[in-house]
Image (cartoon, rainbow, N blue to C red):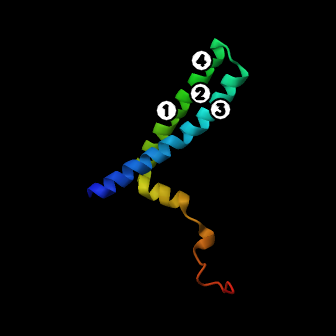
Amino acid sequence: MKIFEKIVAAVFWLQIAVSPVIVTLFLGFIVHVNYPTPLGWVASIAIVALGIIGGIWLANWAAKKYGTITFIARASASPELDHLEEKDTGY
């Protein structure tokens, strides 16, 4: 595996792992704002910790099952654009 390919795979792994973390950071912030008590802090931290663990698990699962590059490519693909050249767009 070439060095560029390893760097791209690592960046995509990070992208896959960070997605659940961003969602849980938002949820943890909402919990913290609504419950500004020590219990709210603990709940917020627990929610974010679950997001971190879930993100790492998801990234490792995607890397093992599909490979990070293939996983991101399939997630980013737009089937609406696959046959755009074949259609008469009028331009």
In the visual, does 51 lie left or right of 5? right
Dividing the picture into quarters, in which one does residue 27 lie? top right
Q: Secondary structure at mark 3?
A: helix
**52 sits to left or right of 8:** right
Q: Amino acid at mark 3?
A: Leu
Q: Residue at x 49, y 46 (%)?
A: 16
The residue where tag 1 is placed is: 53
Residue sitting at 47 percent across and 38 percent down? 57
The answer to whether the residues at label 1 and label 4 have Cβ atoms under 8 Å apart is no
Spatial CA span between label 4 and label 3: 13 Å
| Residue linked to disc 2 | 47
Q: CA distance from mark 3 to mark 2?
A: 7 Å
The N terminus, quarter of image? bottom left
Residue 27's mark?
Answer: 3
Query: At 63% from the left edge and 34% from the top edge, which residue is drawn?
Result: 26
Q: Could you tell me how far apart the alpha carbons at marks 1 and 3 are, in whole angstroms? A: 15 Å
